[in-house]
Amino acid sequence: NKSKDINHVAFHRSYPLFASCSDDCLASVFHGMVYSDLNENPCIMALETLTGHQSANGR
């Protein structure tokens, strides 16, 4: 869970992967999947959360 605002999201060009960075100095990597069947819910699975980063602008 993000405790502060997400300030950047990046998407992979070839794979269903995306990453987000937030003001709580966490970077998270996700796998996303959507289905052609509208009765099937989209699936977003957290793969990794990277910690230990420091804020460069004091947020």
Image (tube, helix red, strand yellow):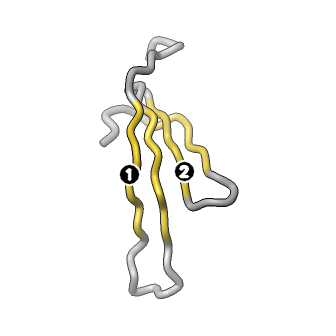
Q: Are marks 2 and 1 in contact (CB under 8 Å)?
A: no
Residue 1's label in the rendered image is: none
Residue 15 figure quarter: bottom right
Residue type at tag 1: Ala
Who's the residue at 48% across and 62% down the image? 32
Q: Position of residue 27 (x, y in %)?
A: 45, 35
Q: Quadrant of the C terminus?
A: top left
Of label 2 and label 1, which has the lower sequence position? 2
Q: Secondary structure at mark 1?
A: strand
Alpha carbons under labels 2 and 1: distance apart = 10 Å
Give the residue pinned by disc 1. Answer: 46
Q: Quadrant of the N terminus?
A: top left
Q: Secondary structure at mark 2?
A: strand
Residue type at tag 2: Phe
Most foreground residue, 27 or 6? 27
Crowd tier of the residue under label 1, counting other residues whose Cα lies within 10 Å: few below 14, some 14–19, many 20 or above = few
Crowd tier of the residue under label 2, counting other residues whose Cα lies within 10 Å: few below 14, some 14–19, many 20 or above = some
Q: Is residue 58 above or below residue 52?
A: above
Residue 18's label in the rendered image is: 2
Q: Is residue 43 above or below residue 59?
A: below
Residue 54 figure quarter: top left
Q: Is residue 51 left or right of residue 15?
A: left
Q: Is residue 16 left or right of residue 48?
A: right
